[in-house]
Amino acid sequence: MWFFIARRVLYAVPILLGVSLVVFLLMKMVPGDAADILIPAEAPKEVADMIRARFGLDQPIHIQYLRWLQAMASGDFGVSIFTNQPVAEELFGALANTLKLALPAALLGCSLGVLLGVLAASYSGTWLDKLFSAVAITGVSLPHYWVGMVLVAAFAVVLNVLPGQGMGPEGFPWTWEHAKHLILPVITLSLIPMGVVSRLVRANVLEIRSMEFVSALAAKGLMGRRVLFHIMKNAAPSALALVGLQLGYLLAGSILVETVFNWPGSGSLMNLAIFRRDIPVLSATILVLATIFVAINILVDVLQALIDPRMRR
Amino acid sequence: MSLQDTIAIRPVAETLQRAQAGKSYWTRVRERLLADPVTVTVMALLLGIIVMVVAAPLIATHDPSAASVFARLKSPGYPGHWLGTDEVGRDLWSRILYGGRLSLLCGVAPVALALALGGSLGLLAGYRGGIVNSCIMRGMDVLYAFPSILLAIAICGMLGSGVGNTILALTVTFIPPIVRISETMTTQVRSFEFVEAARASGARPLSIIRFLHTRRRRSALHRRRIGRRQECRAARHDAAAPSSRYGDLGNYHHRRQGRDAA
């Protein structure tokens, strides 16, 4: 098991290097470099060269990449062109805000998804199954920014019971004042994980239930509840993989929902950075989010291997 | 391919053959299609959209970019603008028609490009194997490390907006899964005996690849269909269900092909 974890983590190293290379090359493909923005057009050439040399922009590209990688790895994400603040501070503040949305949304979406999926599988073929399938497909098909707008229009504008904008007072969401700002965006974000997970769980449970070991368990007189436990344990690894992917998508893809709800998370940060052409902020955000995605995938692989020893290859 | 499978398949295949005897290929296609009302409805809808978009200059009532201060923010049903106008008074019906051209282009072009590029890369990786395979497939692993929307944001956000960059971003996002499928299929088919026979008879690599390509094309087509479906998400979403109907169909074809080849 430890060997498996070590190998899985080691395998992530070249992937992360590749990810950093992609981000770096994209940065270099941006027309103009940081010096062009800092240096006024009428500045003498010597001054421009001096500034370029100070930022290391006169070096060959592979040296620039290694320097940039070193800075990124040591947590120095550079300085925002627009606000002149260190990128790291802005980024981690925004990431914390995104987590406040993404974690409850993933939790709600996946638990609802598992519940709906198991219920649909147990009542497969009846109207209940069709109803749950319809709910799941609707949840997946509706664009979530549109759902967000409709929810804001309904609950914030017409009914005026829940706030539709921002995340309320500073601090950790423990009180009702914080929690009510969470309700609408979390519901919006949880729809897609709910739909996807419930479809997968339903299909998995149906497939596993028709296997011979389940008939054997029932034949030896195991209670329905205990049989369901065994089915769930077999269905868990693939569902886990999907949950991990969905959590990654929630973290990285919340840009639209965060814009709708004016939520100061990493999606809004990226949105602002794109409009301001703030390349340091944008590249650092993308790099960190991709790294988190890789980390989530490793975690999912390890969890899968814990549940199902066959996966410890 | 075991003996039981062959025996189990044969009666079905024979019945099929008898039912289809004396009818041309397209007659059979039409019969099968008409038996599936959902597909027919969706096809009619898509066809309608395509016709509308292509004929945009003929059926548009206004210039899509002509603004008017007097006709701002009119609701649908306003005389002269039957779908109303936007905040600067541009006719919405005309804007939908012309906007649809762009949406259709951004939907079709990336899929076609990704299929061509990803298919070739996967074919190359599967056929050559070894170090070429490792390079291409590890490169795809790197692209897989980005959640798809993040990759698109990275490309469009850094390089700027515009149709060209949008198509580029979507193409790069679609390539990895296509490469994976095409690589797997090529590797599978490559080990068939007919390939070995072709190589022994002195066929050049390119003509062998052409053979492999026809064998493999069907699964790539399935992938494209599923890709489209995920993209519009308008119809049904059962990509999460591992045993979708397309998957079964593909399996059946490959089994049959395997038998034909042996």
Image (tube, rainbow, N blue to C red):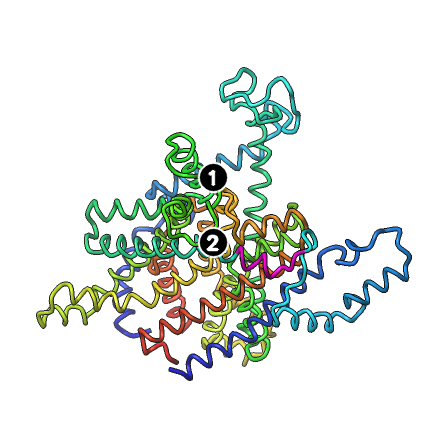
Q: Residue furthest top?
A: B79
Q: B71 or A111: nearer the eye? A: A111
Instruction: Evaluate whether residue A72 shows in this view.
Output: yes
The residue identified by callout 1 is B46
The residue identified by callout 2 is B227
**x then y, percent, for residue A95:** 51, 57
Circle 1: residue type: Leu
Q: In this view, does B228 lie to the left or right of A175?
A: right
Q: A135 or B15: nearer the eye? A: A135
| Residue under the image location 59 percent in, 76 percent down | B132
**x then y, percent, for residue B60:** 59, 26
Circle 2: residue type: Gly
Q: Are marks 2 and 1 in contact (CB under 8 Å)?
A: no
Q: Give the range drawn in magenta.
A: A85-94
**Marks 2/1: CA–CA distance:** 16 Å
Dot 1 falls on a residue whose secondary structure is helix
- Asked which quadrant contains residue A5, the reply is bottom left
